[in-house]
Amino acid sequence: KGGGGAAAGDANVQFVLAGGGVSAHDGNTGKVLWSMVVGRDTNVLPITITAPGAPDPVLLVTDARHDELVAVQAKTGKVVWRQPLGEPIEAAALVHRGKIYQPGGKGSLFVIDPNSGRIEGRLKFGEQRLATTPAADMAGTHLFLLGEQYLLYTITLGGTPKCETVPYYTSHRP
């Protein structure tokens, strides 16, 4: 399904998502560094959730088998934390201003602490599928999230995130 890369210290580490698993490879030699089973329905590549240049980068991996997020060390695959969401995960999370914003397949937008994996908040948008990654505005004060019913939600950040505006009709299809 694709590959991606992330700097792991001075190493060149590349990630592959295929056949229900994710694996990390040395970008210079191709040697497999680690792998984990995440389920055939997983379609999201790992993303880095630590600051750029961190000595031990941590990745966010989606596990579709258990509807959970797993934070792992990029170089070793060692699990840092797991957070079950209880909803299918169909889109990548957004890491923004020290928080993870993860849309769920049953209408929730989860706000997660990237260091502990603790859910700090949850916005509910009915039972509709949220199958796109949220986007932040240039000022970083709002998120935009596409809903299943041709709707675009505007979420105000700062304190507790909240849906502040009436959804916009976009005529997009899920």
Image: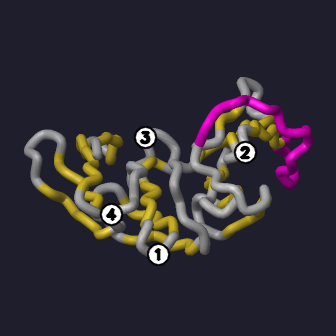
Mark toward the start of the polypeptide (2 vs 3): 3
Q: Residue at x 47, y 39 (%)?
A: 52
Query: Could you tell me how far apart the alpha carbons at marks 2 and 3 are, in whole angstroms?
Result: 40 Å
Along the line of sight, the residue nearer the viewer: 78 or 106: 106
Residue 79 to residue 100: above or below = below
Amino acid under label 1?
A: His
- Picture coordinates of residue 46, whole percent (x, y): 40, 51
Residue at mark 3:
53
Query: Could you tell me how far apart the alpha carbons at marks 4 and 3 are, in whole angstroms?
Result: 31 Å
Q: Residues within 10 Å of mark 1 (few under 14, many from 20)?
A: some
Residue 32 to residue 156: above or below = below
Q: Residues within 10 Å of mark 2 (few under 14, many from 20)?
A: some
Q: Which label belongs to residue 149?
A: 2
Report which quarter residue 141 is drawn in. top right
Report which quarter residue 41 is drawn in. bottom left
Mark toward the start of the polypeptide (4 vs 3): 4
- Whether residue 143 is visible to the viewer of this picture, yes or no, is no
Mark whose residue sits in front, 4 or 2: 2
Mark toward the start of the polypeptide (1 vs 3): 3
Is there a contact, CB below 8 Å, between mark 4 and mark 3? no
Mark whose residue sits in front, 1 or 2: 2
Residues shaded magenta: 156-174
Amino acid under label 3?
A: Gly
Mark toward the start of the polypeptide (1 vs 2): 1
Is there a contact, CB below 8 Å, between mark 4 and mark 2? no
Amino acid under label 4?
A: Arg
Query: Could you tell me how far apart the alpha carbons at marks 1 and 4 are, in whole angstroms?
Result: 12 Å
